[in-house]
Image: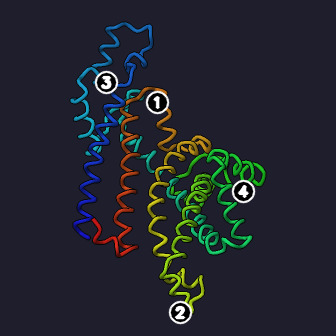
Amino acid sequence: MLLNALRRLGIFALTVVVASVVVFFLLGILPGDPARAQLGLQASEEDVQALREQLGVDRALPVRYLEWITGFFTGDMGISYASRSPVAPQVLDALQVTLLLVLGGIGVAILIALPLGILAAVRHHRPDGTLFSTISQLGISIPNFLAGLLLIAVFAVTLGWLPSGGWAPPEAGVDFLRHLALPALALGLVNGAILARYTRAAVLEVMREDFMRTARAKGLKPGAALMRHGLRNALVPVVTVTSIEFANLIIGAVVIETVFVIPGLGSTLIRAVANRDLVMIQSIVMCVVILVLLANLLVDLVRPLIDPRLRNAS
């Protein structure tokens, strides 16, 4: 198991390096000149060239990549083309906000998916089981931004219980939770419905296994047999899908941050794209890539703990 964990860590490190090369060079070869974009079309060629040298975009791509990736992993992500200020503090502040939002969304998704998916599977031959499946299918069809707007209309505008937008740091306590509630709910509702469908399918598959029939033949009720013998087996594919949903949550957070005016990675990335701030864009995209890879790594390490049969798997 230890060797398998070390192999996973090695794959993770190699993937991060390859991803950094792809991110940097794909963004580096995009058409357009950051210096010309900042100075405007009326600027002289001498001024544009001077700004290119100041920004460092006149050097070869491999040289710029080595400087960027070395600085990225030492905490120096470079200087923003647009604001002329260090990128690292801005990205780290936005990253903290997005992580809190995504973790809140994951919490909401799990709280929705597990009970809804299990009930839909256990009672799939009954009308209420069909109702649970219909609710999850309806949740999948609602976009994140529409869920956010509906929540704002009900809980912020009509009832006035929660703020319609903005952000508060965790140190604010209750105010932080009030600002987090609606965006986390909007982010988690749709992904929770998707995860509920996978949970239902996984539980149904486990319930048809021979060991579940044996458990019921020994006198255990279906619910007790599922909780005692089947749920752990059903969790393996659910945990795997959760890592995939983590990437979808980060992408969905871009939209939710715009709807709720939250200063996270999504809104920061949109501003950077508008300003053609390549240093900021590269750092944000790399942070997102690392987050997704970390989520996949965590799932790879957790799955053998859930299912002992995977501990000696290659």
79 vs 255, left or right, is left
Residue furthest out toward the front: 210
From what the image shows, is residue 190 above or below residue 55? below
Dot 1: few (<14), some (14–19), or many (≥20) neighbours within 10 Å? few
The amino acid type found where label 4 is placed reads Trp
Q: Which residue position holds label 2?
A: 218
Mark closest to the chain's N terminus, 2 or 3: 3
Which mark lies nearer to you, 2 or 1? Answer: 2
**Secondary element at tag 1:** helix
From what the image shows, is residue 203 above or below residue 227? above
Q: Which residue position holds label 4?
A: 161
Q: Position of residue 99 (x, y in %)?
A: 46, 53
Mark closest to the chain's N terminus, 2 or 1: 2
**Quadrant for the N terminus in the image:** bottom left
From what the image shows, is residue 141 above or below residue 278? below
Q: Which residue position holds label 1?
A: 273
Residue 175 in view (yes/no): no
Which mark lies nearer to you, 4 or 1? Answer: 1
**Secondary element at tag 3:** helix
Identified at 61% across, 47% down, the residue is: 144
Between 48 and 143, the one lying in front of the other is 143
